[in-house]
């Protein structure tokens, strides 16, 4: 187990370097001079463009730039954005907010999605099952931005329960509604997945054996059935944690949340690679870790899966 | 000669003093209830006047810095602010005397050298300031910005700036420019305190100014707050205790905040709010609608084959149904342009473009006939380039559709998107396009001159279409040297009418600013730049 962990972590190192380099090249290849568009509808003075190019080394060959970049990054210096804000500050500010938002969404997905799925899987074709079916259908068919705008208008403007935008502190309470908006789709998918898995495993041999042994129903379901049904669900949740950290640009925009997704999007539009590269690297790191955690949980859930 | 005070036409729409009404105000209940919040965004550059030229940073600097001149919020007339007097005998050398009772927020006395040093620093090429070119009229600017980019300037002081005593300095221009002091109300001419030079970078994130409000806090992508400066020596000190700009990624969210009372002022309402006049239901009478200093235009590369015929360019202009587009696309948030300037500018004339900016398909086709009779060959494809990262696609495509309908079969127009503004600008700077360019202009100071010389004088910095006309150049030069302001304005207006004959740029829309505010505001006014008049804001 320990060696497996070490091996996985070591594998992450070349992946990280490879992806940062790729991202660096891609951002660098984006057409357009990042400083030419900073003077409104007029040409920027040469003096400005030259000074900026020099400061950000854009006049040097790609590999030299990348070398400097990595050297600085290894010392923990991510440099400044083109508007002279330390990149580390921006990330330090956005990352906790995104993490909180992701956890709120995740909690919603697990509590609502998994519970509803498991219950309807246990009581197939009941009223509750049908209710879950219809609700998930509805949840899957509403685009995120529509739901976001609608809840913002209904709860924020009409009823005044929440403020339409999230404040700078982005407290847990403020993130509940945005978290639900982000989680809706995955919650529905999770519910469907959990239902099918439970329904299928209910007919499995080991369940019949457990019942035949005279095991009480709560132990059959809680220990045997649930534990065996968790593997696909955990996989989905693990992958979704990655997505939640990365892909909430739309919802972040609607509720004015300063998360990582919006940070990257803004700076891609401004051709400002100083932020794009480190945050994208962070995303890669998050995915690697999320996958690792999922793989480790497999081992706990199913002893047949062993890591050497 | 003292700076002229009275100007020509004052557009009535500019006087927007709205004394409010709003709902059940118990007026005395103090202003303690948190700062007045205004929508904003993360400034693109550090907050240094010489290095900021976009609205988000500019709006804030406006509150932080007082300048030599100030534009009257109602009329756009410049008046002396820190300057006690600006005198000249020859319209080339100006003696500027400043008030001796002014200081910076940190308590240091404001002296003439603070202006001289700041201007020299901003103009010094190697410092790479965005607003560097503003100082090019001053004698000795070239020495700080040598033609050869790699050469180190031999001096870091412009010979045209001379300190006389603590409160007086003299500015000498390269050539006479009677209206030069008019621009001294623009942010780039702000003074900088000594602390700036110790650490310009730190200053940029925590500026020390001399205006009605002093810097308080800045959280990136979140908010910037300024507090009232109680020792403000000017005539109109701030009233509300503090002002906070909240940064929004998405303007529609700002609007939701505004109508639910979570935001006090929204400077520019979104198209979604303007659609079907939704905002008038949402805000009742809590909005201000006025002309702004923003133009939307189609600049033609006048030197390129197929675009070098003025008659053809006029034909294109007459094939655009501006009124219809303004209504359909902007919900009348912009209006049809009738010239190259907007009503917010001093010296503006009605209908400078005349019939050439009216929609007349038949006449447009006749003009095209005329051009062809004269040996002109219509380009196979007329390309209209625009940057696709802002809200331009709709109107550019609509203009192209107009052309294709009016000139059906005679030419094929295309809207050609360029993904980012950075790429678009770079290609324009490198002159890589032949055809038509989406352009716009936000005035720097409210004068007709600002809509003409930077854009259309031969070789001017923003003359993207490489337009060149001796008559135009001479008229502008003459106007600049004329010390009689009425005469100067007439000359500028004449120059503008020359543009109608040549049509180097097709004016499409003139911007309007529609600002909304919450019922917490008691008084709210917007200046000719479309920015709230900070010192006049009051809350219930």
Image: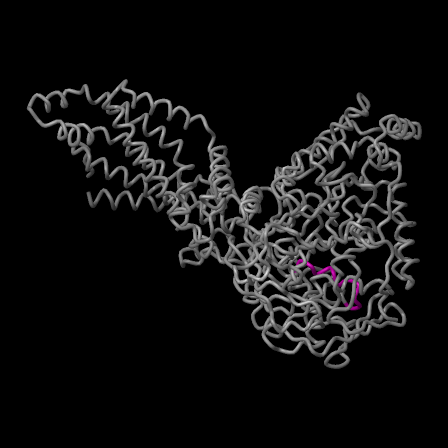
Q: How has the structure been colored for display?
A: one colour
Q: Does B202 sit above or below residue B420? A: below
Q: Quadrant of the C terminus of chain B?
A: bottom right
In the foreground, B272 or B178: B272
In the foreground, B317 or B470: B317
> What x and y, as percent, mark residue A5?
24, 44
> What x and y, as percent, mark residue A25?
50, 44
The magenta-colored residue range is: B129-140
Tally of numbered discs: 0
Residue A150 lies in the magenta-colored region: no
Q: Does B222 sit above or below residue A133? A: below
> What x and y, as percent, mark residue A298?
23, 35
Quadrant in the rendering for residue B77: bottom right
Residue at horizontal 86%, vertical 41%?
B353
Q: Quadrant of the N terminus of chain B?
A: bottom right
In the foreground, A10 or B448: B448
Quadrant in the rendering for residue A198: top left
Q: Main secondary structure of the magenta part?
A: loop
Is A217 on the left or on the right of A92, as rendered?
left
Residue at horizontal 92%, vertical 29%?
B370
Can you see residue B495? yes
Residue at the bottom extreme of this rendering: B165
Residue at horizontal 28%, vertical 22%?
A196
Residue at the left extreme of this rendering: A213
Residue B133 lies in the magenta-colored region: yes
Can you see residue A59? no
Is A129 on the left or on the right of A207, as rendered?
right
């Amino acid at each position: 187990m320990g060696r497996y962990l070490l091996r996985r972590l070591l594998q992450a190192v070349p992946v990280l370097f490879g992806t940062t380099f790729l991202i660096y090249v891609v951002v660098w290849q984006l057409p357009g001079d990042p400083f030419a568009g900073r003077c409104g509808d007029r040409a920027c003075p040469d003096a400005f463009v030259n000074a900026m190019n020099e400061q950000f080394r854009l006049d040097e060959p790609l590999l030299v730039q990348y070398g400097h970049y990595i050297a600085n990054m290894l010392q923990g210096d991510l440099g400044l954005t083109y508007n002279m804000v330390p990149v580390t500050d921006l990330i330090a500010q956005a990352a906790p907010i995104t993490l909180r938002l992701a956890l709120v969404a995740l909690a919603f997905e697990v509590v609502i999605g998994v519970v509803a799925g498991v219950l309807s899987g246990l009581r197939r074709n009941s009223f509750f099952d049908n209710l879950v079916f219809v609700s998930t259908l509805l949840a899957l068919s509403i685009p995120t931005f529509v739901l976001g705008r609608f809840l913002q208008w209904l709860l924020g403007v009409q009823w005044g329960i929440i403020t339409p935008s999230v404040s700078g502190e982005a407290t847990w309470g403020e993130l509940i509604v945005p978290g639900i908006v982000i989680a809706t789709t995955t919650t529905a998918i999770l519910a469907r997945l959990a239902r099918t898995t439970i329904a299928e495993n209910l007919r499995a041999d080991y369940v019949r054996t457990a019942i035949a042994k005279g095991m009480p129903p709560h132990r059959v379901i809680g220990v045997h059935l649930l534990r065996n049904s968790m593997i696909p669900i955990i996989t989905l949740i693990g992958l979704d944690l990655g997505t939640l950290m990365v892909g909430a640009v739309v919802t972040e925009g609607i509720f004015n949340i300063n998360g990582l997704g919006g940070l990257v999007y803004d700076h891609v539009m401004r051709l400002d690679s100083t932020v794009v590269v480190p945050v994208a690297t962070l995303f890669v790191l998050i995915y690697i870790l999320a996958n690792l955690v999922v793989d480790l949980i497999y081992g706990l859930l199913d002893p047949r899966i062993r890591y050497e | 000669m003292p700076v002229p005070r009275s100007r020509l036409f004052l557009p009535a729409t500019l006087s927007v003093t709205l004394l409010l009404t709003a709902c059940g105000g118990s007026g005395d209940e103090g202003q303690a209830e948190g700062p007045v919040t205004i929508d904003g965004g993360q400034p693109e550059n550090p907050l240094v006047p010489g290095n900021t030229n976009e609205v988000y940073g500019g709006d804030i600097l406006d509150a932080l810095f007082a300048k030599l001149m100030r534009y009257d919020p109602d009329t756009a007339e410049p008046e002396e602010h820190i300057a006690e007097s600006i005198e000249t005998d020859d319209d080339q050398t100006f003696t500027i005397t400043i008030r001796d009772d002014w200081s910076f927020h940190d308590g240091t006395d404001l002296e003439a050298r603070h202006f001289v040093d700041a201007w020299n620093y901003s103009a010094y090429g190697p410092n790479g300031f965005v607003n560097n070119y503003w100082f090019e009229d001053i004698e000795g600017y070239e020495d700080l910005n040598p033609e050869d980019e790699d050469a180190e300037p031999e001096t870091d002081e412009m010979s045209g700036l001379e300190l006389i005593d603590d409160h007086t300095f003299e500015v000498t221009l390269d050539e006479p420019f009677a209206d030069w002091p008019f621009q001294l109300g623009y942010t780039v001419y702000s003074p900088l305190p000594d602390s700036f030079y110790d650490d310009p970078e730190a200053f940029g994130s925590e500026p020390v100014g001399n205006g009605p409000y002093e810097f308080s806090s800045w959280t990136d992508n979140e908010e910037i707050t300024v507090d009232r400066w109680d020792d403000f020596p000017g005539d109109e000190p701030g009233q509300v205790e503090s002002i906070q700009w909240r940064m929004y990624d998405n303007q529609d969210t700002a609007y939701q905040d505004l109508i639910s009372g979570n935001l006090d002022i929204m400077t520019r309402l979104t198209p979604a709010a303007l659609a079907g006049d939704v905002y008038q239901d949402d805000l009742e009478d809590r909005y201000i609608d006025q002309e702004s200093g923003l133009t939307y235009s189609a600049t033609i590369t006048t030197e390129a084959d197929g675009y070098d015929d003025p008659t053809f360019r006029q034909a294109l202009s007459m094939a655009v149904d501006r009124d219809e587009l303004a209504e359909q696309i902007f919900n009348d948030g912009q209006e049809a342009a009738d010239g190259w300037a907007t009503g917010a500018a001093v010296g503006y004339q009605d209908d400078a473009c005349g019939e050439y900016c009216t929609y007349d398909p038949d006449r447009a086709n006749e003009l095209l006939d005329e051009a062809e009779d004269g040996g002109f060959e219509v380009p196979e494809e007329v390309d209209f380039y625009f940057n696709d990262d802002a809200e331009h696609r709709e109107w550019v495509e609509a203009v192209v559709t107009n052309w294709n309908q009016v000139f059906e079969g005679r030419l094929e127009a295309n809207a050609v998107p360029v993904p980012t503004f950075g790429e678009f600008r770079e290609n324009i700077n490198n002159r890589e396009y032949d055809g038509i360019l989406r352009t716009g202009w936000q005035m720097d100071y409210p004068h007709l001159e600002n809509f003409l010389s930077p854009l259309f004088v031969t070789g001017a910095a923003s003359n993207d279409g490489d337009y060149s006309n001796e008559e135009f150049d001479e008229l502008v030069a003459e106007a600049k040297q004329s010390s009689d302001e009425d005469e100067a304005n007439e000359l500028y207006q004449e120059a503008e009418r020359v543009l109608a004959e040549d049509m180097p740029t097709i004016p499409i829309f003139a911007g309007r600013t529609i600002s909304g505010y919450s019922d917490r505001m008691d008084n709210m006014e917007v200046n000719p730049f479309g920015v709230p008049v900070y010192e006049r804001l009051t809350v219930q």
